[in-house]
Image (cartoon, rainbow, N blue to C red):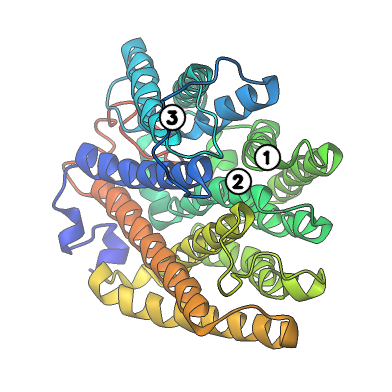
Amino acid sequence: MDALATGVETGVELVAQPARSGRNLTLALLGYYLAVVAVITIVPFHFVVPERLAWARVATLPDFLANVLMFVPFGFLYRASRPRLHAGEVWRAVGMGALASAVVECIQLFEPARYPTPMDILANAAGAALGAMLCQTALRRVHAPAALIGRLSLQLPLMGLVYLIVPLLWVGSLSVGGSALRLAMLALPVLFGATLVGFVQRFHFGPAGAATAPWMAGAAAAGVLLGAFPALPLAPLAVLGLAGAAGAVVLLHAFRSPGVERRFELPALRSALPFYGTYLVACALAPALEGDPLGTLGGGVTLRTVEILRLLHAAAAFTLLGYALAELRGRLELPYRKAAGRIAGWALAVALATRLAGNATLGDASWRTPEEDALWVALTLGGALYGGWLYHLQRAHVRQLLTPGSGQATGSAPPARGSLLPGIPSH
């Protein structure tokens, strides 16, 4: 009997115990979120040694709220990596959030364009607390029997794509730069993610009675608000519309007949990927379509904040693409060292095609140089490989949970609450 039929992977990815594999995965996602946050908060990287170290004493309400929201995923993921459902774990998340924030604020002391303040540390710690409490609430709210995870097997890694959309929306919103086109383009990854959540609700949570359709629709809308909040001051109605559209798509899928298809991963991806493919093409053509080369790296011109953010956005977009490419072939059970070559090949082809199309569309208006194109391709390729690695970590964790003796394969003993990756509900 093959690995797919038994739900047991025989590769080296299953050496770790469930708690360890879940923690490795969550920490990898946590590191990715922190890397995105670090870049967002210390651009444009013009570091100098000040005459004296000075902290700002006040923070505006919008900045305070933004700092709270930015650390909600940190608290959520950190809490998800802890094996015990205990109030003390929330305080650990608060402490770790405050520590990470303090490090970033200290770096900002050497960035003249930034104004570090103790209020930011307080706001980030509050966001980490909120995220940790949301995680605990979700673990109590979503109830699923052990047999449900065993039945779904490879489908649950689909949720990893949903979690990668939040940082993508962050940098996408921050790099809008006043462009109405780029703001409208955010609807595409929102529809991509909402379609995936709709499939998960329709084939997974709904039939199991794990969560109601309105609850999942509300969660999808909240996720969009969490990701696109940087664009709220620019276009509040547009952002609220994106959140509403996400919830509506989830409801449309949820209320359709689930049928008998148990392995819905590939149908879900095939339904959602056209939105994301269109988004990648739109990102490549946006500089020409909006009639503004902003976001290209002008030769000899100092990188502006929005330009750096658009580079980060490209890396984040290809991180999600790499995860999707790995998941499309996930049933082959290839170890990462073998799958990485295919992921790199497809990602490189997409990166080169979109970059060349963008350059050709810009024509004489392009400021891009071969060195700048090489940097863009390197960042997107690195992002794709990291995304593929995240998928393999998540698949290894799910497979470990299904391995006889882990408690999930037999349904004899549930895993410890909080030891599972977000998207894999515990008891």
Mark 1 vs mark 2: which is more N-terminal?
Answer: 2
Residue 182 placement (x, y as % from top left): 75, 59
* Label 2 SS: helix
* Label 3 SS: helix
Residue 68 placement (x, y as % from top left): 56, 25
Residue 303 in sight from this viewpoint: yes
Q: Residue furthest right?
A: 237
Q: Which residue is mark 1?
A: 230
Residue sitting nearer the eye, 222 or 308 = 308
Q: Is residue 314 above or below residue 95?
A: below
CB under 8 Å between discs 1 and 2: yes
Q: CA distance from mark 1 to mark 2?
A: 7 Å
* Label 1 SS: helix
Residue 179 placement (x, y as % from top left): 79, 57
Q: Mark number for residue 105?
A: 3
Residue 110 placement (x, y as % from top left): 42, 37
Figure label count: 3
Mark 3 vs mark 1: give the one in front: 3
Given the image, on which type of amino acid does mark 1 rest?
Answer: Pro
Q: CA distance from mark 3 to mark 1?
A: 19 Å
Given the image, on which type of amino acid does mark 2 rest?
Answer: Trp
